[in-house]
Amino acid sequence: MTKRELIEKTLAGVPTGRVAVSPLVCGAARGLVGASYKEWSTDASLCGESFVRAAELLDMDCVTLLVDLSIECAAWGQGVIFPENEAARPDYSKKIIKTPGNYAKIKRVDWKSSDRMRFYADLCGYVVKKIGVSVPVFAFVFGPLGTLSMCRGQEDLFMDMYDCPEKVKAASHEIALTLAEYAGALCDTGVDGVMLDTLFASGSIMSKEMWEDAEGGDALLIARAIREKGKKVLVHNCGKRVYFDSQIKYMNPDAISFLYPPDDCDGFDECREKYGGSVTLIGCVPPTYAVMGSDEEWSEICRSQIKSLSGGRFILSTGCEYPAGADLNRARLMVDAARRA
Amino acid sequence: MSDNQAFGVLEELSRAVMRGNAETAESLTKEAIESGLKAEVILKDGLLASMAAVGVKFKNNEVFVPEVLVAARAMNRAMAVLKPLLVGEKALSGGKVVIGTVKGDLHDIGKNLVKIMFESKGISVVDLGVSVPAERFIEAAISERASIICCSALLTSTMYEMKNVVEEAKKAGLRDKVKIMVGGAPINSDFCKEVGADYYSPDAQSAAEKAAEILGI
């Protein structure tokens, strides 16, 4: 069975007899091309080549192209800092939404006018061209509310959701319109699907009702744009007590990438029982362990996750980004654990 | 105003804080002062008690980050009215904690939530901000005579700075005098043990409860 067949069958819920595996190796791959974080975050070919080499070196069954969470916000003029050896991030000393009145500045934009979005589309195109025939490739998009938080700061955004929710929602909707078009364009690069990060749909952040009201409809809009291109919709959320039910209700994703059990499950076993038949579960090895403990302890955690979550639709992965400073050997051990399962 | 009426104002004040209504909290604090209630009583029974209740609800997943933030904002607005009437930091004498996000890490929302929960328990907090070098934690703990150092990190790339804080505390001869607490998204109890810290807390309210226990509050 080819990697493509394995992933397509896994996402479709067809038994494969194999555990698919794809550690979320992103910034950690930059060493494979000798790039600084800054170079890696701005040069699409260099970044793309690092993902290609990581996929080949680690023998991954699919690749998700997560670079950083500030790709999207730059389209609205939010300044971004590119440290040499850390992930790019918004310059919060120059937030473009300084007051609630500034939400009105956020309007739908042409994604092609954004250097960072164009960089990202080029990255997708590069990786698809190099390995897309044999290895499924998934793009990654930060959701509208998360993108808005990059322009306002999380604390202020959360308080604004109390003080002036309509202003927040209006701005978030404008972003969603842009992201829907952008996600569609990413699909046109040939990726197999788009993983949407709905970070705030989690009990560690806000109530289910608040998330559904603020972002549910916009998440639906973006998911629909992806599906209209005939591509897969994946969701990522590494918060605690994630709202699987809400995200399924609005996006009906093919897969959910997560780190902790959802809010309505006591553990991973219950999660598999409840959701493993209807949506592909991606995870949930804590990335922290990639930089601590022994190799054997890491492999045991991987085996334990396989035991808990396989049997339904499942791809073994880290529940969030594989640490950018970690040796790739642990990622390789994760792949080995899946192959031996 | 009778005693009953005065305590009625305190109850209303508590409700205003819990609902995050800053303007009402401010005006009720003024009303409570005018009614003759002591500032310490207003602080303890009106503000800190309500924030502590919010903390418990947060831990029990009954309220979430936005609710905690607006409640803290309401409490701070009321505190601004009350502060000139409080003698020194008499009412906040439950011990002192130095807190910060470790070097290289600019995330502060988790650290700020912990600070809110600490203050709701009457613990004085010295907030060192974000990207705090290990040496700075130690200098502050010494100069502020803090009993606890709290380190926050959101990134796997920065979390090992916590080990440096532990090492610096040892070098400064402080290790048996202060407790070191760690927390943040990538942190867990295994990591806490590995770096030699004393306590890991999975959420802000648990951190405050542990700190209160350490400080004997």
Image (spheres, coloured by chain):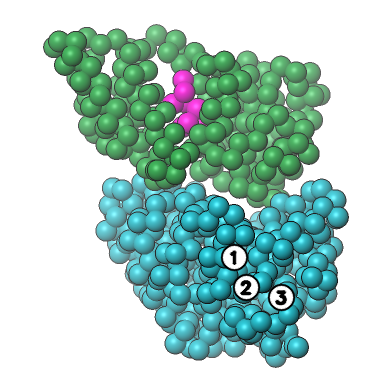
Residue B143 screen position, x and y as percent: 64, 17
**3 or 2: tag closer to the N-terminus:** 3
Most common secondary structure along the magenta stretch: helix
Residue B50 screen position, x and y as percent: 35, 28
Residue at point 67% right, 18% down? Answer: B142
**1 or 2: tag closer to the N-terminus:** 1
Quarter of the image with the C terminus of chain A is bottom right
**3 or 1: tag closer to the N-terminus:** 3
Q: Is residue B121 magenta?
A: yes
Amino acid at pointer 2: Gly
Amino acid at pointer 3: Ala
Question: Residue tagged by mark 1?
Answer: A272
Give residue B203's quadrant in the image.
top right
Q: Which chain is cyan?
A: A
The residue stretch that appears in magenta = B115-122
Question: Residue tagged by mark 3?
Answer: A20
Front position in the image: A238 or A175: A238
Q: Is residue B71 magenta?
A: no
Q: Nearer the viewer, mark 3 or mark 1?
A: 1
Using the image, tell me which numbered label, if any, was put on residue A312: 2
The verdict on a common chain for dots 3 and 1 is yes
The verdict on a common chain for dots 3 and 2 is yes
Q: Is residue B45 above or below residue A299?
A: above
Residue A139 screen position, x and y as percent: 59, 76
